[in-house]
């Protein structure tokens, strides 16, 4: 068995870096949900306990003028729109919802501020602009994680916990167990299928095998050449799914200073350069403030130099959380959509009108088995889904080889 990894590191969309304060920070996946049992089990196995995501103080809704108090009408209209999505998720999804974009759904919400709030919340949850995703795809995501309340919540939801040492470091610990089976800098460029099995061509040579598991998102898998050509159904999956667009930064401070002002560190920006912030600090010591920018806001940040981007974001954080924000002890950032191997995040979603592409992403093609979070039924788009998909693909391979699982 060999694991061919294109990059010079393992982890993919999980990437842990060390701050100058000595703390571990996740530039990719970070939260583990309340019912993410596969991840909780791995965390236990590798003695990396989960700890609660900090939740102290007041969260802010921001405009370029500063924090705002939402009117009861805005709260009601936004709540109703979100409830409607939850209700659609709990019933049979009409085929027509796949042709309606989230932007069109939002345009029917009464009130400009409620429209903006709903857009920002869902763009951040799905890492795309509302015009890029259909209502059916949003509802599919909501279902797979167990409901909208779960998707958006910290305690009792998908953001309940953080992982000691970081999610990327857990991937590295798994790779360490596999030792020399993991080959870095081996980008797979082509797979040839024959009755005898597969020949896998990578940037570092050729390998023959009985079966292969391709554990990359469908739009990334589309970069691999196939002989013979893949069947139409599989090409449909690869051509009609797109990666999300997401920028993430972590500002590291000596302490989570915002808590002293009664603030949670969590904010949502309705306009201006700061879409969302979260407190993802370790249990003691340093303060970690996470900044997430999806879709067009992420692309706008790409157009700035690293220094201008950092200054603009920190100035904005300081306007709302106090001048202490201007002097972090460390700053880490990543534009995931510009990573040549990952190509975006949080995950891939179907183009409007093509939800079926995601639904058949797990169907094997002869001796090729497809894994990765996009193929998961449960927690599609999350680390949990990735682990579940790996187990499912491994079982398919063992069954195919006639081995006892
Ligand atoms: C900013 C961000 C925040 C996120 N936050 C969370 C979170 O808080 N909680 C959560 O559960 N999930 C989160 N996610 C999603 C989570 O990271 C993914 O669901 C998960 O990591 C997907 O794992 P995977 O193994 O399916 O794919 P990947 O992690 O993408 O792994 C695929 C691997 O394949 C490699 N590869 C690509 N092409 C080739 C090739 N041709 N040959 C060989 N190797 C190749 C890549 O380098 C990569 O290492 C986040 C993602 C991002 C980007």
Image (cartoon, grey):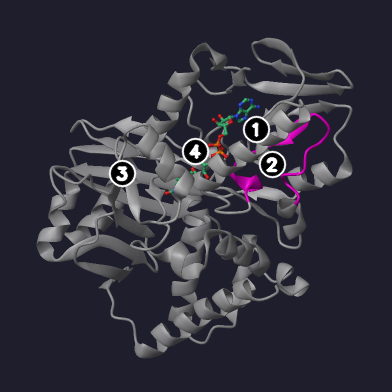
* Among the two numbered marks 2 and 4 on one chain, the one whose residue lies closer to the N terminus: 4
The image position of residue 342, as x and y in percent, is: 56, 35
Residue at 52% from the left image edge and 87% from the top image edge: 110
Asked if residue 43 can be seen in this view, the reply is yes
- Marks 2 and 4, how far apart at CA: 14 Å
Residue at the disc numbered 4: 13
Q: Which dot, 3 or 2, sits closer to the camera?
A: 2
| The quarter of the displayed image where residue 150 is located | bottom left
| In this picture, residue 199 sits left or right of residue 81 | right
The reply to whether the C-beta atoms of the residues labelled 4 and 1 are less than 8 Å apart is no
Q: Name the spot of residue 142 as percent of width and height, x first.
A: 56, 64
**Where does the image place residue 63, in percent across and percent down from the top left?**
33, 70
Name the quadrant of the C terminus: top right
Report the residue marked by disc 2: 218
Front tag of 4 and 1: 1
Q: Quadrant of residue 172?
A: top left
Disc 4 element: loop
Mark 4 to mark 1 CA distance (whole Å): 21 Å
> The N terminus is located in which quarter?
top right
The answer, for residue 274, to whether it is visible in the render is no
What's the magenta region? Answer: 360-376
In the picture of the structure, the residue carrying the numbered disc 1 is: 394
């Amino acid at each position: 068995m060999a694991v061919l990894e294109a990059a010079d590191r393992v982890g993919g969309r999980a990437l842990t870096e060390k701050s100058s304060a000595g703390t571990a920070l996740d530039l990719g996946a970070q939260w583990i949900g309340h019912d993410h049992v596969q991840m909780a089990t791995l965390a236990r196995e590798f003695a990396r306990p989960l700890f609660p995501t900090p939740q102290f103080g007041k969260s802010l809704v921001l405009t370029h003028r500063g924090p705002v108090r939402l009117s009861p009408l805005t709260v009601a209209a936004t709540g109703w729109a979100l409830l409607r999505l939850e209700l659609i998720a709990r019933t049979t999804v009409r085929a027509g919802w796949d042709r309606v974009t989230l932007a069109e759904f939002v345009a029917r919400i009464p009130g400009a501020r409620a429209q903006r709030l709903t857009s920002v919340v869902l763009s951040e949850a799905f890492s795309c602009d509302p015009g890029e995703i259909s209502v059916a795809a949003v509802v599919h995501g909501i279902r797979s994680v167990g409901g909208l309340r779960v998707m958006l919540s910290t305690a009792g939801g998908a953001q309940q916990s953080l992982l000691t040492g970081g999610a990327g470091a857990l991937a590295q610990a798994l790779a360490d167990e596999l030792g020399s089976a993991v080959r870095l800098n081996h980008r797979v460029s082509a797979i040839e299928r024959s009755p005898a099995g597969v020949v896998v061509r990578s940037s570092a040579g050729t390998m023959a095998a009985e079966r292969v598991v391709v554990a990359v998102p469908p739009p990334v898998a589309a970069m691999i050449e196939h002989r013979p050509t893949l069947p139409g159904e599989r090409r449909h999956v690869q051509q009609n799914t797109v990666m999300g667009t997401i920028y993430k930064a972590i500002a590291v401070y000596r302490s989570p200073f915002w808590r002293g002002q009664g603030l949670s560190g969590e904010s949502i920006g309705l306009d201006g350069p700061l879409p969302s912030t979260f407190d993802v600090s370790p249990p003691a010591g340093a303060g970690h403030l996470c900044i997430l920018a999806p879709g067009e806001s992420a692309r706008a940040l790409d157009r700035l130099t690293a220094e201008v981007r950092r200054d603009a974001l920190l100035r904005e954080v300081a306007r709302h959380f106090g001048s202490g924000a201007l002097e972090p002890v460390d700053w880490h950032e990543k534009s995931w959509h510009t990573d040549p191997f990952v190509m975006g995040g949080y995950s891939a979603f179907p183009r409007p009108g093509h939800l079926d592409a995601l639904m058949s992403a797990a169907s094997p093609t002869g001796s090729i088995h497809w894994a990765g979070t996009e193929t998961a039924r449960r927690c599609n788009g999350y680390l949990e889904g990735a682990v579940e998909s790996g187990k499912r693909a491994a079982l398919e391979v063992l069954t195919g080889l006639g081995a006892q699982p």
